[in-house]
Amino acid sequence: RNRAERLNRPAPQQQRQAVRFEDLPEYKRVATQRIAGELLGVANPFYRSHDVAAGATTRIGGREFINFASYDYLGTNTDPHVAESARQAIDRFGISASASRLVAGERPGHVELERKLAAVYGVDAAVCFVSGYLTNVAAISCLMGPQDLVIHDEFIHNSALAGIKLSGAARRLFQHNDVENLENILKSLSSEFRRILVIVEGIYSMDGDIADLPALLELKSRYGFWLMVDEAHALGILGKTGRGSFEHFGLDPRDIDIWMGTLSKTTSSCGGYIAGSSALADILKAEAGGFVYSVGLSPVLAAAAIAGLDILRSEPERTERLRRNGQLFLEQAKAAGLDTGISMGHSVVPVIVGDSLRAAQLSNDLLAEGINVLPIIHPAVPEGMARLRFFITCNHTEEQIRRAVAVTAEKLRSLLDRNFGLASLDV
Ligand code: PMP
């Protein structure tokens, strides 16, 4: 008897081999895209390395660019007040919170930041997590379970989808911003669910349009669901003083059950938050795995976010400048015949160009002209809907915006005759 038999194990030739990563369909998709790019001479536009803090302008490889690829919508990332607050926090607390707040305790910044976030929404409490992504995953998976139903706009962010999946709740999607479609789903529900959660975004990150909160609240009053609004792209942007969607529509923010947002954009930090009732905050702090079992927000990032929020509250003119810039970009782009989809010109304006590789080539052509803007390609958007996504900031000048639109229109025209479909390649 050989050794395998003696040990009562299958003979070596019958042993199971682990699947090679190279053989995964996921890898084949990535490789096909790379080969197609190489064959068509389209360089990879992603992961460009910046030499400086990237805002309305940036430097890449020693060269200056007008930049439309930063979420620093309000220019707070390089503000001296933010930097000084972060420095003071380093001196006092070091960099890390070192462990979960449950175990390692809190720093004053955690409490102050959560108090200030709650004040923005006029609600009782807020809870911070270490990223916006984690916030959605942790909160949704904590509040919902297999007996529940989540209904969401078809365009919601991947992090919310991940949270729903983890929760085990049933999931239905409604057509983008189509409140009638949502109502039809609510009317047609055959089974009894313990809880129903509807998730939308204040400003949609791929398209730059907004949720119809008044209509959603009206539905909520009749169908009794929780409403969750992801304000990642709306805090500091919508509303006269930048308090977001509720201010834009003149609503009472306490009528929305769950406010969610990120600290990485207008508040120049990293992290995310949920704001709402004290009971909601208490539940998340006690039960959400992404809070209980993950490190607390770095005290440095908490300090930076507090300073970012202070700027947002004390300098509403930044929000006003951003609004003017967004409208100028949208007007100019439409006048130049560019397809800006359903964008309303707030913080995000896409220019839809069709094939993924055309979007990548256009991004490279604009880089050659001193303009940095990134493509969004399949699978983030459906194939054929690839786009350049322009993030507008309050610090872009009128001249930068006019030039960016004119050069984009010109470069796109010269690419329209070229076939970028993968079908045109034998790969
Ligand atoms: N929600 C939306 C709508 C987003 O666009 C993003 C990221 N851009 C997130 C959540 C996640 O936020 P973060 O990048 O802070 O993790």
Image (tube, rainbow, N blue to C red):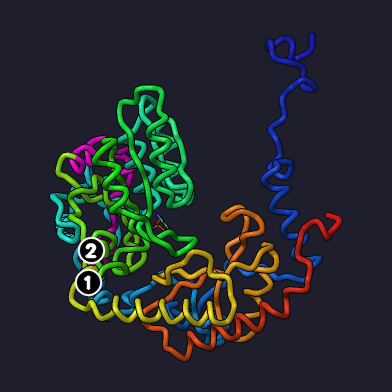
**Is residue 259 shown left or right of residue 1?**
left
| Ligand 1 in which quarter | bottom left
Q: Quadrant of residue 25?
A: top right
| The residue stretch that appears in magenta | 280-305
| Magenta span contains residue 292 | yes
Quick check: marks 2 and 1 in contact, CB under 8 Å?
A: yes
Q: Quadrant of the C terminus?
A: bottom right
Residue 218 in sight from this viewpoint = yes
Give the structural element (helix, strand or loop) at label 1.
loop
Give the structural element (helix, strand or loop) at label 2.
helix
Q: Is mark 2 within 8 Å of ligand 1?
A: no
Q: Mark 1 sits on what residue?
A: 241
Q: Amino acid at mark 2?
A: Glu
Q: Of callouts 2 and 1, which one flags the residue occurring earlier in the amino acid sequence?
A: 1
**Is residue 179 shown left or right of residue 349?**
left
Image coordinates of residue 176 in percent, x first then y, are: 47, 51
For disc 2, the neighbor class at 10 Å (few under 14, some 14 to 19, many from 20) is: some
Q: Is residue 426 above or below residue 294?
A: below
Image coordinates of residue 221 in percent, x first then y, are: 24, 41
**Considering depth in this image, is 89 or 332 the residue closer to the camera?**
332
Residue occupying the far right of the picture:
426
Q: Amino acid at mark 1?
A: Thr
For image coordinates 24% across by 59% down, the residue present is: 246
**Considering depth in this image, is 303 or 241 the residue closer to the camera?**
241
Residue occupying the far bottom of the picture:
399
Image coordinates of residue 346 in percent, x first then y, are: 39, 70
Q: Which mark is residue 247?
A: 2
